Image: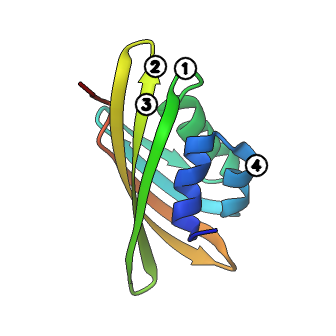
Amino acid sequence: MGTLGERFADAIGDRDLEAMTALFAPSVDFRGMTPGKFWEAEDPDGVLDIVLENWFEEKDEISSVQRAEAEPVLDTRHVSYRFEIDNPDGPHVAEQQAYYRVEDDRIVWMRVLCSGFRPRD
């Protein structure tokens, strides 16, 4: 089943809206940074919109998910994940680092840093 961070990466890879929604508390402090923009959300629907409608769109077919959870830094957990992606622009790789905090088995705080889509040979 994996940690909440690993399940977050898997939900992205599977485009599983229900699974992703279940990971977050009703009120969440979410911030993300991609190469060209900063993103913010305060609830699970906002996170879904950012992650599955903007960062990874329908046209982005994720063929591989590699993920690794690191040791927590006190109350803050860390997961890194890498996706192999195919879309109309060709094959790409994207990696993200996410730090998150949990209360009552739900993510209440998350910060994500993204490499952007990098062309794959």
How far is disc 4 from disc 3 in space, using C-alphas? Answer: 22 Å
| Residue designated by label 2 | 87
Q: Contact (CB < 8 A) between labels 2 and 3?
A: yes
Q: Residue at x 55, y 43 (%)?
A: 13
| Residue designated by label 4 | 18
Q: Contact (CB < 8 A) between labels 2 and 1?
A: yes
Quarter of the C terminus within the rendering: top left
Mark 1 and mark 4 lie on one chain; the one further toward the N terminus is 4
| Residue designated by label 1 | 59
Q: Residue at x 58, y 36 (%)?
A: 52
Quarter of the N terminus within the rendering: bottom right
Extreme residue toward the top, this view: 88
Q: Contact (CB < 8 A) between labels 4 and 3?
A: no
Q: Position of residue 46 (x, y in %)?
A: 63, 44
Image height check: is 78 above or below 80?
A: below
Identify the element where label 3 is drawn: strand
Residue 85 bears which disc, if any?
Answer: 3
How far is disc 1 from disc 4 in space, using C-alphas? Answer: 20 Å
- The amino acid type found where label 3 is placed reads Ile
